[in-house]
Image (cartoon, grey):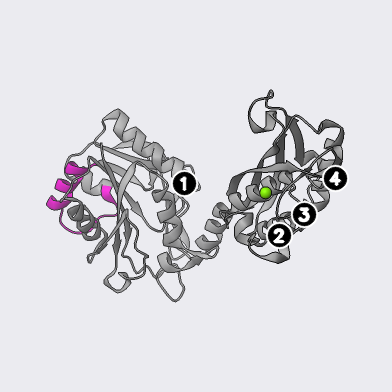
Amino acid sequence: MTTAAIIVAAGRGTRAGGDQPKQWQALLGRRVIDWTLEAFLAVTEIDRIVVVLHPDDLNRLAPHPRITVTVGGATRAQSVRNGLEILQADPPTHVLIHDVARCCTQTAYIASILYTIQSTGSPAIAPALAVTDALWTGVDGRVTGTRDRAGLYRAQTPQAFEYTSILAAHRAYQGDAADDVEVARAAGIDVTIIDGHEDNIKITHPHDFTRAEKILGNQMDIRVGLGFDVHRFGPGDHCMLCGVAVPHDRGLQGHSDADVGLHALTDAIYGGLAQGDIGRHFPPSDPQWKGAESHIFLRHAVALAREFGFKINNIDVTLVCERPKITPHATAMQAALSEITGLSLDRISVKATTSERLGFTGREEGIAAQAAVTLVKPCA
Ligand code: MG
């Protein structure tokens, strides 16, 4: 099975206010359309995404290997049809059709709609919420009547269809339609309702931007970073390990003070930030770092995390060696890491293991260290 998505983004909607169409307006520092596309791009089962744009907007999206841009028509229905026709050259089995202004739609939700249509064999699946508020009619700010809400739903997108069925339905359809369920039903296609989501709002009015900011702002960006380092033994009377001078009959060799634990941890933070490694920020070719105390590197990584808006949530360092024994110094190491990173002790783990006398650590040729960190920030 192959799947495509069509994002309908050709509208000029003026109800949302602002100096440009809502899909191009900023929301938590990004454009509305970018939030929507990110959610769909993260569904790896979607092979292609067709974005239907207004002719004036064709150059406003950065090229992406999974995104095709096409021009919209005079109506929403015509825009969707244009998107469907583009896919005809290499037809998918299923297509998701989505309004760009529903920018709070979650990746897991999109994936679940896709899974439902593929696993049930339904020709069409559409999310909706049963109406729970009382319904009135009104004229000029006065209630003129009430309506029975039983059996009424508020429709959402993405709506999922068998590709060939919805293409044929659109080709046969005349005029505009509120959504693709209307087009599908006109062609006699059976549409199954699945539960929509209250957070899957559509930006329509100016205050919807504030609602969307609240929904998107509640999400967390959670990163895991891993670091690994090795230093060999050489002459000396102590090893710097996680910021603590541990007495030993040898020392660790390296360009800096060779604190293998701090190096692994520093690289874990850089890794979580996708910002390279120590060598990139402190090139060994630069003489100013010769013999440097490694807390300098760690402090830099911690500051960089803060600069990117991340909070370091926890740290876990494992030292691998036969000797020196680490456990007697583990509490001092935790305290040193706490001082450098600002984390409380209950978020810092320092532990050690031997390698059962196997390999270079077993032969006491050097010490290895592994570190893991989690970094968190609101998804803004
Ligand atoms: Mg190193």
First-in-chain label (2 vs 3):
3
Q: Which mark is residue 300?
A: 2
Tell me how far mark 2 sits from mark 3, CA to CA. Answer: 8 Å
Tell me how far mark 2 sits from mark 4, CA to CA. Answer: 21 Å
Q: Amino acid at mark 4?
A: Ala
Badge 1 element: loop
Q: Dots 3 and 1: beta carbons under 8 Å? A: no
First-in-chain label (3 vs 1):
1
Q: Quadrant of residue 191?
A: top left
Dot 4 corresponds to which residue?
A: 245
- Of the pair 305 and 145, the residue shown nearer to us: 305
First-in-chain label (1 vs 2):
1
Q: Quadrant of the N terminus?
A: top left
Q: Where residue 3 sits in the image (x, y, percent)?
A: 28, 43
Relative horizontal placement of residue 143, taking residue 328 as reference (left or right):
left
Residue range (magenta): 162-180
- Of the pair 288 and 276, the residue shown nearer to us: 288
Report the residue that reaches farthest toward the bottom.
19
Tell me if residue 302 can be seen: yes
Q: Which label sits in the foreground, 1 or 2?
A: 2
Relative horizontal placement of residue 58, taking residue 369 as reference (left or right):
left
Tell me how far mark 3 sits from mark 4, CA to CA. Answer: 13 Å
Q: Amino acid at mark 3?
A: His
Q: Quadrant of residue 162?
A: top left
Dot 3 corresponds to which residue?
A: 295
Q: Quadrant of residue 213?
A: bottom right
Q: Where residue 351 sits in the image (x, y, percent)?
A: 75, 33
Q: Is residue 181 magenta?
A: no
Badge 4 element: strand
Dot 1 corresponds to which residue?
A: 106
Q: Dots 2 and 3: beta carbons under 8 Å? A: no
